[in-house]
Image (cartoon, rainbow, N blue to C red):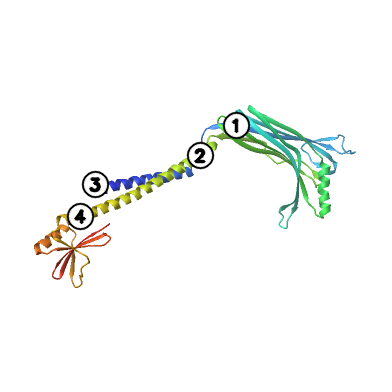
Amino acid sequence: MNNNKKNIYIIILSIIIFLLGIIFIIYGLNFKNDGTKVYSYKAQKSDNYEVLLKPNNFYSTEKLPAGGYYASNSINSYIINLKYDFEGNKKANIDYNYNIIAELVGIVKSNDNIDKEVWNRSFLLKDNSYYNQENTDNFSVEEAVNIDYPYYYNLAHLYEKTYQITIDTILKLRLNISYNINSSDLVNEKIDDFIELDIPITNTVSEIKENYQNVLSNEINSHLQNNEFHKIIFYAVGALFIIISISIIIILKILNKKNKKEIYIRNINHIIKYYKDLIVKIANEPDLTNLKTINISIFEDLIDIAEQTQNVILHYESLDNVKNVFYVIIDNLVYIYNLHLP
């Protein structure tokens, strides 16, 4: 197999490796490992409450049930029970913590009729509580909260009176819960969730609105743990293939240049060795002005011309040896054979 064929095969191989690199990178960009289900869970969230009334002559009971509308000035307090039930599909170690906060949010309408928050104050009703359960598939959180409705009502009205502004105030009651799930095939799966209730404060009528999804459920697949790792592998392999293909082309180019230089030097040495009796080396290029030049592509043809006309062959070599020129001058004709370093 000659060098040209070898070069062609090597170039084809490098192109294939380069394309494989591109394919790996594209695959990495679009990689989605469906994986297998390693864990699933469901969290049921709920609330219930009752309204305790101020002393009055209008109601036959001191408590009103949930789900209604209530005159704001009649409310003494809301007794609210928050419940969070978690259940997994298999045993795991679960660390969880939760707190309860109340947040007063004052809102006004802007000129373009968009709600703008002008006041916000938070109250920590229950500090963070931390729990750890080992080898379990469930846990529950249940907390009762007493909302002193007149306190928040009076505070909101005091804000309006102090700053001479009319606002709509909402009390946001929120149970924040966070937990980590650890098992043999699941490491540090963190989940943040909440239960939030909205209670209007400055309105003449109050109610409780749920502002959360009652059920949180999810399936955790293996790709959630190793998807990014696989992408990095694909990127790395793709980049490696591209680097290899480019390196092959560069090395091939260097070797070809080296081979061409070796061939060039070998040709010069061959000519000097076997035809030294016909060759006269000159220091400067001859003046070819007014001479008709004929370029010869085969050195042996130049030998024949010199022998037939009984002329010598003039040999000029450039100082850097990148150019060797051979001349046979006959009257007003000059025959030229060029050898240049590729």
At mark 4, the secondary structure is helix
Residue corresponding to mark 2: 229
The quadrant in which the N terminus is found is top left
Q: Are marks 4 and 2 in contact (CB under 8 Å)?
A: no
Label 2 and label 3: CA atoms lie apart by 45 Å
Label 1 and label 3: CA atoms lie apart by 63 Å
Q: Nearer the viewer, mark 4 or mark 1?
A: 4
Label 3 packing within 10 angstroms: few (<14), some (14-19), many (20+): few
At mark 2, the secondary structure is helix
Give the mark nearer the N terminus: 2 vs 3.
Answer: 3
Give the amino acid type for the residue marked by disc 4 in the picture: Asn
Give the mark nearer the N terminus: 4 vs 3.
Answer: 3
Q: Which mark is residue 182?
A: 1
Residue corresponding to mark 4: 269
Give the mark nearer the N terminus: 4 vs 1.
Answer: 1
Q: Are marks 2 and 3 in contact (CB under 8 Å)?
A: no
Give the mark nearer the N terminus: 1 vs 2.
Answer: 1
At mark 1, the secondary structure is strand
Label 2 packing within 10 angstroms: few (<14), some (14-19), many (20+): few
Q: Position of residue 76 (x, y in %)?
A: 84, 39
